[in-house]
Image (tube, rainbow, N blue to C red):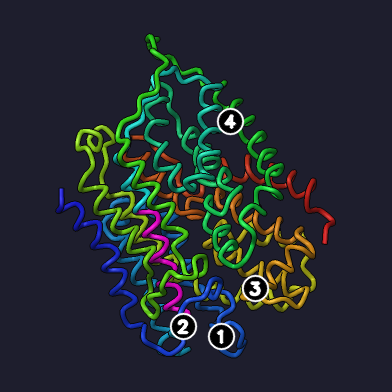
Amino acid sequence: MFSNLKKFFLSPLIIFLFFGTVNVLAEGTGTVPGSAVISREVENAAKLPEVYMVIPFVILLLMIATGPLFYKHFWERNYPKVSIVLGSVVVIYYLAVLNNHHSLLHTLTEYISFIALLSSLFVASGGILIKVDRESTPMANVIFLLVGAVISNIIGTTGASMLLIRPYIKMNRERLRPYHIIFFIFIVSNIGGALTPIGDPPLFLGFLSGVPFFWVIDNVWYIWLLALVMILGVFYIYDSMNKTEYEKIEYSGKIEFKGTKNLLYLLVVIAAVFIDPAVISWVPSLAPLPFGIREIIMFAVVYLSYKNADKEILKANEFDFEPIKEVAYLFVGIFATMIPALQIIAHEARVLGDKLSAGVFYWATGFLSAILDNTPTYMNFLSAAMGKYALDVTDKAHVLQFVALDDIYLRAISVAAVFFGAMTYIGNGPNFMVKSISERAGIEMPGFFTYLIKYSIVILVPIFAVIWLLFFYGRG
């Protein structure tokens, strides 16, 4: 058991060593909410990276998309090396050419926070067994996904995805198709979590920056509901067309729940999200270390929840660390290689801020959230939107003033950052984990481009266009 746990912790250790050349004791490296997009380096255009430094990011995305299709054996054996090598190119450039330690340290801080949250929710939920002994019908699946969307706002899209994907697969085992998983990613792993700061990381960072906790649900609920109704409607049509023949059996209609103690671990993780000096003043900061008490608690949950889990439940869930290991390695490369792209975008967004309308904010935030981390994308465009009023995103009083002045931009940015994360496997952390778990369950998931062309563009883009026309077109 513990050998598996050691293998899992090896990934963050390698990641830490990968960034080890960063001088974490450099002066002024304490992290501030949102500082990734408004750091001193970004403010000074002369220190912007060269455009060609986006090439490692493009190469990594292309290899993630094509590796499983055209050179699967090589990719499965070497994706950690590819990710780290490409990330190292950017790290070395920032150290040797730009002498920019701050951006690297902040990215390391964000990565550790990211993997701490995902891994703690992944392991804690792995010790919970949910059995739904009901026939898989289109309406039953619609209800399941709708409940999952609501739960996403309580325990986050990652928590809901890890808790529900296995029972969802088992419930549909007789007629399971890839589209079942894809709509799960659309709804539970992304769009469902658009109502609260707990639901998705960009909304939480907005909360840390000063956006009132209940602002999101007050201003987004009707857009959220419309999006869910449209997507669930499309899903119902897809599922109704699934005429798979299978042997009819009797169902008890019961829902069995085991591993109650692991619910406590999930609650600890959710509570730990708020253990941040920006939320609770008496919480000590561990700066200049690239992690805080929150991350220590989350990694402790990884260890304790796995150590104390019911082994029969882990076996029934076919639990192993491969999905989170894949996320850990791939996203360290993504986080590192996207630094130049994010900084160039941040600069351009601030320069062109006066010319950006609500519709532009919506599509720009959405498109970039689909291929970049949606959290810094959210903060970049929030900073640009506040600049239209000569306000500073690092000042909580300014954020509150911005919300009171005009919230159409914030609404567009918030909706797009969460919704468009469903467009690709890399748009949001849970997407890749759900894909990996599903593949290990024997489901042949579509590749990166098939997912994008066959499902995202065909299903999501028209729905997102309707939302744009109804709520953001011609505004601002």
In the image, what residue type sits under mark 2? Answer: His
Q: Which residues are magenta?
A: 103-119
Q: Is residue 159 above or below residue 83?
A: above
Please state if 42 lies on the left or on the right of 88 as rendered.
right
Residues packed near mark 4 inside 10 Å, few (<14), some (14 to 19) or many (20 plus): many
Q: Residue at x 76, y 58 (%)?
A: 408
The crowd level at tag 2 (other Cα within 10 Å; few <14, some 14-19, many 20+) is many
**Disc 4 versus disc 1: nearer the observer:** 1
Q: Residue sitting at 71 percent across and 62 percent down?
A: 361
x, y (%) of residue 473? 81, 53
Q: Which residue is mark 1?
A: 40
Whether label 4 touches label 2, CB < 8 Å:
no
Q: Secondary structure at mark 3?
A: loop
Q: Residue at x 38, y 46 (%)?
A: 266
Badge nearest the viewer, 3 or 4: 3
Residue indicated by mark 3: 393
Q: Which label is found at residue 235?
A: 4
Q: Which residue is mark 2?
A: 102
Find residue 228 and report its image quarter.
Answer: top right
Disc 4 or 1, which lies upstream in sequence? 1
Identified by mark 4, the residue type is: Phe
Answer whether residue 450 is visible to the viewer in this image. no
Q: CA distance from mark 2 to mark 1?
A: 8 Å
| Label 2 close to label 3 by CB (< 8 Å) | no
Q: Which mark lies nearer to you, 3 or 1?
A: 3
Instruction: Decide which of tag 4 and tag 2 comes sooner along the chain.
Output: 2
Judged from the image, the secondary structure of the residue bearing numbered disc 4 is: helix
Q: Considering only order in the chain, which callout, 3 or 2, is on the residue closer to the N terminus?
A: 2
Farthest residue, direction right: 474
